[in-house]
């Protein structure tokens, strides 16, 4: 059983780390500005699913194994960077037409979220280093790691959804073609910035 004080400290640390703008936040905001809150929330959920997989790998003890094969991280990283550059350039070069919600765009939004989360493979090593800091050696590690993983994802859901809602409000309030063109430019810059951030991160 994890002590209440440890849980509070973990939630505070997680919230601080998650709230700092990075590639995930950039993509969430860009998507919400361009397509609305629902699309932004879709990206949040896909990102959380990807992080849940990463946390599951950590809990299962696979982080140490994967860290020995850095080429896996390299492939994930550069595939994600390339995808973000592609959609960022597309956003910058579109003429400002309204984005319609269709099954194909929903799939693209999901791919955008997954690509961003998986293209940042150092998050796997981050979870491997961060979660054990709050594990007590006096109790079984597995239940503690599972609890911490769920808490982390819950905090991420709240904070990331907050970014999506705020950016989605801006999308809902302004519908002019000039506004859409501006938002597409902002989205393109945000996506390219996320790609640049990921490209400059060392894998190990």
Image (cartoon, rainbow, N blue to C red):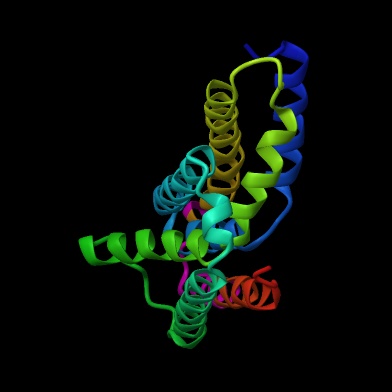
Task: Tell me: 184 left or right of 200.
Answer: left
Q: Is residue 133 visible?
A: yes
Q: Nearer the viewer, residue 163 or 166?
A: 163
Residue extending furthest toward the bottom: 93
> In which quarter of the view is residue 1 placed?
top right
What residue sits 47% from the left and 68% below the top? 176
Number of numbered markers: 0
Instruction: Locate residue 7 relative to residue 188 in the image: left or right.
Output: right
* Magenta stretch in the rendered image: 172-186
Task: Determine whether 175 is above or below 85 in the image.
Answer: above
Q: Nearer the viewer, residue 72 or 80?
A: 72
Residue occupying image coordinates x 66% and y 36%: 131
Q: Position of residue 98 (x, y in %)?
A: 37, 70
* 180 magenta-colored: yes
Q: Please say whether residue 140 is one of the residues in the magenta stretch.
A: no
40 over 165 or under it: above or below = below
Q: Position of residue 4 (x, y in %)?
A: 72, 12
Please, what is the dominant secondary structure of the magenta stretch? helix
**Residue 154 location, quadrant:** top right
Which sits in the foreground, 58 or 173?
58
């Amino acid at each position: 059983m994890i002590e209440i004080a440890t849980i509070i400290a973990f939630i505070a640390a997680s919230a601080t780390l998650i709230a700092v703008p990075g590639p995930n936040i950039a993509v969430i905001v860009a998507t919400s500005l361009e397509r609305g809150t629902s699309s932004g929330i879709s990206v949040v959920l896909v990102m959380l699913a990807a992080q849940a997989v990463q946390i599951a790998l950590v809990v299962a003890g696979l982080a140490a194994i994967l860290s020995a094969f850095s080429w896996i991280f390299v492939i994930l990283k550069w595939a994600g960077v390339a995808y973000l550059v592609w959609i960022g350039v597309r956003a910058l070069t579109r003429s400002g037409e309204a984005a319609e919600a269709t099954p194909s765009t929903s799939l693209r939004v999901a791919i955008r979220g997954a690509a961003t989360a998986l293209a940042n493979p150092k998050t796997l090593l981050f979870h491997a280093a961060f979660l054990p800091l709050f594990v007590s050696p006096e109790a079984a590690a597995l239940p503690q790691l599972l609890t911490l993983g769920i808490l982390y994802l819950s905090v991420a859901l709240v904070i990331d959804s907050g970014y999506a809602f705020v950016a989605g409000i801006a999308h809902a309030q302004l519908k002019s073609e000039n506004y859409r063109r501006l938002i597409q430019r902002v989205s393109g810059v945000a996506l390219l910035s996320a790609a640049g951030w990921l490209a400059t991160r060392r894998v190990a």
